Each structure stands twice: as C-alpha cells, then as structure tokens.
Image: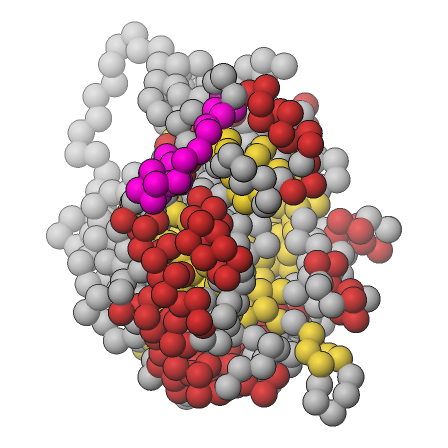
Amino acid sequence: MAAPTIYPTGTTVFDPEKTWSGYTLYIARDTGAALVDMNGNVIQLWEGLHGFPCKPLPGGMVMGSLGVRDPQYGYMDHTDVVQVNWEGEVTWKFDQYEFIEDPGNEGMWMARQHHDFQREGNPVGYYVPGMDPMTEGGSTIILGHKNLVNPKISDKMLVDDVIYEVTWDGDIVWEWVCSDHFDEMGFSEEAKNILCRNPNMVIGKGLVGDWMHINSVSTLGPNRWYDAGDERFHPDNIIWDGRMANIMAIVDKKSGKIVWQVGPDYRSSPELRKIGWIIGQHHAHMIPKGLPGEGNILVFDNGGFAGYGAPNPSSPTGHNNALREYSRVLEFDPITLKLVWMYTYFEAGYLNRMGRYHFFSPLISSAQRLPNGNTMITEGSNGRMLEVTSDHELVWEYISPYFGEDGKSNHVYRAYRVPCEWVPQVRAPEEIPVPRMDISRFRVPGTEWKEEQRKTAVKGARGYASMPQLCVADLTIDED
Amino acid sequence: MTVRIYTATGCARCKITKRFMKDNDIDYEEYDFKADGKDAFSQFYRANRKDIFRDKDGVEFPVFSDGKVIRQGVSVIIGYLVAGDDLHGFIGRSLLHGEWIDGFNVSGGDPAGMDDLLSVLAYLKKNGLKIQISTDGRNAAVLQAVKEKNLADRVIMEVRGPAALCRPPVDEGELKQSMALTARFPDYRFVTTVAPVERPEGGISYLTPEEIGQTAGMIEEATGGKKHPYVLERFDPENAEKKEFKGLEMLPDSAMFKYRTAARRYQVMAEIKSQR
C-alpha cells in the first residue's frame, strides 16, 4: 500500500494467450457500475448504480443497489438490492426488511444490505459453467444489518449481521442472526473481555458495535464433500466470514447451527498454526463445482488489523489485536486445512519485508477462481485488479481510474470477471496484448529515458551481491 | 387471627407492603427470612409449600398470611387488603423485578372493581414502582381510567387476531378503543401470538398470515398509525391451556416470516419475538 504519486491507470498488463478473457465488472467510485474489457475500455457504465458489491447476471444485467442510507445514522446500509437490465431499468427490487426513519429523512423501507448477496442458481455470484444465476425468478440470499443488544456480547447496541433469504416475490423465508450464535464461536475469555467493552464501536445512529462485520455470504452449492457424505457441506449451507473476528464459518441452513469454522484463534491446532493467523479476511467462499480447485476454500486474507484478544504493544486494549502488513490469497482444503495455493508479495516476485506492500489491501478485496485455473484478484484498497495463473504469473492488471469526488481513493470493493456471452448486447472486443513494461525506462511527459550521461568505473569496487541484505532477517522461523 | 408477613432484608416491595399496612392500621407480625425470622418462615413454608410460589431464583417476598389465605407479592397482597378477592383476575403474580412490576391485566377482572384496582395502582406508583399493565381489549373503560390517572408506565396489548376470532370474545368497537388507548401510553407494544383458533365453521387451525395482516390492519385503523411496536410470537403447543391445542405441531421458525411480511403491510415495525 505504498503507491508513488504518479502511476498509470487502466490496463497495464494483458497477455491474451494466458488470461481467461471477458469483461470485468466493478463499482467505479462515486460513479456507477463499470463494465470494462480486457484493454480497459469501459463498454457500459450503469451510472449512479451502487453495489456492495455489484454482481453480473447473464443477459447483460447486473445486481446492485439504488442508494445508501444516510451515513450519519446507518453504517454501510444499502437501501435495497436491485436487478438492472442493460438499459438501466430496474427489473427486480427488494427493500422490505426494515422500515427506517432517520432524522431529517423520509421514512422508508430498506434492505439494510451490505457486503454481499447471492441470487439462486449460482452459489457464489461469479461465472461457473452450468450454474447461471436466475434472472427471471429465484430467491436471493442477502447479508443485512439489524440493531440489537445481546447481553452475552456487550451491553452496547450492536449493528449485528443478519443473513436472510427473500423470494422473487419479496417474501422473507429464512433469517439467521449472527449474535444468536455467539456461544458457538469459541471466543477466548480475553476476546470476550474486549468484545464486551468495545464490540468495535462505529458511528451509525450514535455509536454502535459492528462486532462481527461479516463481509461475504455465499452458498456452498454442489460439492465433493457433501457427495462423499459429509452433511456439514450440504449445498444449501451458507459460508460467511467475519472480518472483525477473523472467523470463517459454515451455517447449516436447516438448523442455523455453525457446523464448520476456522478462527478466531489460529493457535488452536497444528493445521491452523501452519496456515497462519488469518486477519480481516474478505470473500471467503467455496470454489464451486466445475472450477479448478472445486471444494476448496478461497479467501482474500487481508492482513492489516482485526481480531479481539489479549492486549499487546500494538493493541493496548486487545481490539484489533492481530496485525500484518501484507495480504495473502489462500486456497485451502476445508477438511485437512492444508494450504493448496497461495498468492502474496512473495509469489508476485517482491522482496520480503521491503516488498510486502506490493500486495497489500488492509480492507475490502476478493478472489475469483476462473475456469482455466487462473485467479482474478481485487486488491481493493488501491483499486487494483489482477489476474494471475496457478503458477503466479501476472497475466492481466488493471487499475481503476475512478478516484471519486474527493480524488482521494480509487478503491474497489470487489470486481468480477464476466464471460463475453453474458453480455450479448455488444460484440466481443478485439484483444490487444499489453506486455509488461520495463518501468526502469518508463517516463512521464516532460522527461524521457536516456543513457547515463557519464559513467566512471570505481577502481577496486568488488561488485554487488546477488541477494540484498536488509536490516532484519529475511527468514521466517517456524517456531513449531 | 394474627396477620403475619414474611419478608427479606432489603426487599423494597416488602417495605411498601408494610407501609401500606401501617397506613391502613393493619397490625401484623413480621418475620424476616434473612434475619431472625428464618426458622419461622421455614416452618411456614414447609406447612404451606403448595400455596407458595417458588422458582429457580427462590421465593418471592413478601408473603402474607391472615390465617385464612396466603397471598404473595406486593400487588397481590395490597389488592387483597383493599378488596378481598374482588380484584382476582385484575392482579396476578409479577414476573418483573426491580423497579418494574407487572401482573396487572385490566381485561381480566370485573369492571365493578375498577376503583379498587386504580387505588392499588396509585399506591404502588406513589411508592416508586414502574407499572406495566396488559390488556386483550376487554374493559376498555378500565384502561381509559388508568390512562387518565396516569397509573401505568407501559402497556402490553395482546391482540389475539381479527375481532371475530378473539377468545375470550371481545366487541370489535371495544377492541379498537383499547388499541387507540394503548398507543397513547408512553411505552407500549402490541403483541399477537400466532396461535391456533377454533374456527366458527368447526375445526382448529393456526391463524393465517392473512389474518395476521388483518389484525395489523385493525391496529392501523384503530390508531391511525402504521408505526407501532408490534411483536409476533410463536405459539408453543406444549404450554397450551386447552388440551385440544396440545397435540398440534409447532409452527417452524421459517413460517413466522410470512406472518411478519403480512403484518408489515399495515404495521411497518412488526417483528418476530426473538427465541434467544
């Protein structure tokens, strides 16, 4: 997360031979939903559409939201979830979760949606062969908010996470309230202590505790674990992750019980110690059947700051007590917890310690498995979207040029790669390769690269070592 | 026969009861369970176990005995001292502790006892208790009197369904009058248990989502508002009073959402009672 003042936006790398090409859909900050081709041309902008996230549907349609609740009173609440066609017409809408009357605002129904939703037909909201999301029917799983007090957690008002399912006709038919399952989550006494005192208080109708901060919800869909008889992985079951608690969990759709969980304590087993402390993660989901890695869990492990636990020098109260200054994309087996694939600064080819920031997004972000085995990653905090092969080769990179009204950030919550067939309104674009540039000779107008004007050989100089030595050890010692 | 009162050190409701008896020149003997009266109460409890309510938190004090009857709890005792058994139906055991007291059902008693009920409420309120009363719509005149004299801090109105299905029966006009009055209290909520009902045409079945919608609509019609606190509860056949209802299957959790959706068309704050 250390960018120079001047850097290019748009597509910066594109190898058509190695990518799983299509369009990329993301919310351009303060602008709308942008659909860009591999060369970075915006072929459609759904102007004004919000999306947390915005999701593609076949037929040139998208899902998102029409607006956001007054931020003085709501915390990330979106007013509704809508389906919008190519012409910008709303063809489906749900908002009847809670009637909200904020001071100075008209009372209105709101979905209070945030961070995720899934339309029936597809478990994860991105392209899976043979699993198209429904566009003329089907239910939608929505992640929302509900304000409540749960004395088991804290005496403070919580902005709790709820997951609910709404039919095409707008009937809510299932609801799961996160705090109801607090006892199942295995928080330590240290974690409960700080949770009680500070359940991550944020501003929203006064101070409220965003204690779990779920940011991803998807169904498991058909999978090999269930096929082998493991009921925990019933296709209807729901996987979610809670950024603030460093938890990933699967909820049994029928009973509501948590039947599988990773976190919050990554010291609790040798397998978890090997994975390492997952911090502030986003977009944990099971790779759907039909895609390479199917059945594994794919997650953007942000690092940054999150968690509740014992105080330490970086966290005097135990709030946000886990810290790491780089991100990881992890793919792991949900049964053995064995790491299958990983992408970090290291796989990206950067130095330890000094180069970690080259792949780091402390907030937002996501990972999508593509049909050719590549992984499309949103490194959200700096608006970078990239596609890497299973061998970690960077084959596409794009940086959002939308810096918002204040010009301060081009962050992107989550982007999705969309197959061209899902956008029948336009002809598939010509693909122009964009080779990775040698930036040592890359100059902006007003300057130009030139050979050194004078070179003077220093007599007796012994040359440079092949490995740079830094001020700290460049090894991670496995203390186990 | 000597009037005895069994108390516990520090029990505020015991003090209110004793104050009432002093104010009304009723002589009594006091036995403090947490002091010298422990043995006396233990002996009394063993002899009258079936008449003394006790739960996991223990016995609720004060306990009163005049040799003829045993009464327990400040409101029940004062009600008895004011009107004998005439307030039976209006005053029951309080489930709330601390500054709040409940157990007052304005629909449950004979309206002829209204003045005595009001005097009990007034005494408790004067002594610093916050009063929660309940109604099912009957005895709207009593509710109105409570409102006019400002004798309740919170009202819970149990609306049992559309007027034609309410049991005990209640006149629709009176039901709506109670609804309108309820909404005028500083703290209130409407509650409907999604319960089985005996159908006029015969048979027993749960209230339908449409009927809950009608119920919510009636609240809107009676009060002129759509934004009242309205709680839907799930019926538990195991706790049913009527034996015909005990064998029914409990509605699944998920069934409640349709009821909530139906209610929210008329009462936007409708919510399902948490099972937590």
Q: Position of residue A105 (x, y in %)?
A: 23, 71
Q: How many marks?
A: 0
Q: Position of residue A241 (x, y in %)?
A: 54, 47
Residue A314 position by quadrant: top left
State yes or no: residue A261 in magenta: no
**Eyeballing the image, is B33 above or below B134?**
above
Q: Is residue B234 left or right of residue A428?
A: right
From the image, which quarter does the N terminus of chain B lie in? top right
Residue A391 appearing in the image: no
Choose between B231 and A2: the one closer to the eye: B231
Residue A334 appearing in the image: yes
Q: Residue at x 49, y 36 (%)?
A: B3
Q: Position of residue A23 (x, y in %)?
A: 49, 70
State yes or no: residue B28 in magenta: yes
Q: Residue at x 31, y 60 (%)?
A: B151
Q: Is residue A391 left or right of residue B103?
A: right
**Eyeballing the image, is B2 above or below B210?**
above
Q: Residue at x 26, y 76 (%)?
A: A106
Residue A170 position by quadrant: bottom right
The boundaries of the magenta stretch are B15-34
Q: Position of residue A259 (x, y in %)?
A: 70, 45
Choose between A375 and A31: the one closer to the eye: A31
Q: Is residue A271 left or right of residue B272?
A: right
Q: Residue at x 52, y 67 (%)?
A: B108
Choose between A105 and A80: the one closer to the eye: A105
Query: What colour scheme does the image use?
Result: secondary structure
